[in-house]
Image (cartoon, rainbow, N blue to C red):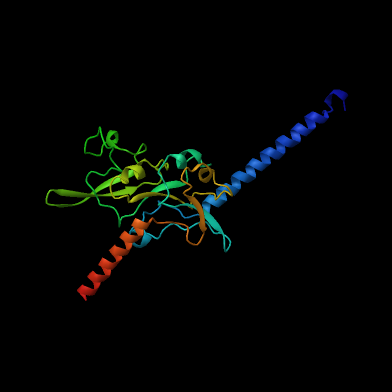
Amino acid sequence: MAIDNIPTRRAFLGDVFRVLGAGGMCCAGLWLTLRAGSGPQGQSPQTSAGGKSPAAEPLQPLPRRPGSYVWQIDPDRCVACDGCQKYCVLDVSAVKAVQCFALCGYCDVCTGYFPTQGYVLETGAENHLCPTGAINRRFVERHGDERFFEYTIDEQKCIGCGKCVAGCRLMNGSLYLQVRHDRCVNCNECAIAVACPAQAFRRVPATEPYLLGKNMKTAIAALERRRQAAGGAST
């Protein structure tokens, strides 16, 4: 072998570290792919009476060992800043807006959907408060001169900015933010929790990974009582 073909010690170590680094990234990518694939598929449900979706059970967290904990937002402490969008380690935040239908007023002029000024009462994109158009507005019914609309979240579009949540608090406050555990990687130290000005993030049991605010619990309980009373009357 010619002397000028013998690698130097620095060049040799550089090659070794490059190979190890490439291998590490490949393993990390495979791990994240498998982890994401193990979660529930499809659109995330919204919260209705009883804390469940009208059409599906709530999302379940990724399988974790007994006694494990996950990150979640306390709706009663959340101030709906844009920290969930900014600080999540994922490119698109694992935090999504959620609708509590039991508390929603089904308003024609919803301040979680429309800006408080400079808009027209129609669904054109220029009239949306949401910057990504993640809120769907659907006509439900009319009573006299009043119209009622249902507002649902397209979580594929939601970036967790909290604009709709802050706007909705001017009325019923039925929109709130939650960490979705089919997306969250459950970091040991959540970057959003560290930056949260209201300290609204906390660890909760993985068996009960989602939280409701006090007003939401009250509205859901009242709705359940009405349903039971109606059921009893019909029999």
- In this view of the protein, which residue sits in the foreground, 101 or 34? 101
Given the current orientation, which residue lies at the most extreme top position?
A: 4
Name the residue located 32 percent from the left edge and 64 percent from the top edge. Answer: 221
Q: Position of residue 113 (x, y in %)?
A: 29, 42
- In this view of the protein, which residue sits in the foreground, 133 or 100? 100
Answer whether residue 134 is visible to the viewer in this image: no
Name the residue located 88 percent from the left edge and 24 percent from the top edge. Answer: 3
Answer whether residue 32 is visible to the viewer in this image: yes
> Seen in the image, is 222 located left or right of residue 20?
left
Name the residue located 58 percent from the left edge and 61 percent from the top edge. Answer: 65
Q: Position of residue 84 (x, y in %)?
A: 46, 42
Q: Position of residue 116 (x, y in %)?
A: 27, 37
Residue 4 found in image quarter: top right
> Seen in the image, is 186 located left or right of residue 122?
right
Q: Position of residue 148 (x, y in %)?
A: 21, 50
> Seen in the image, is 103 located left or right of residue 181?
left
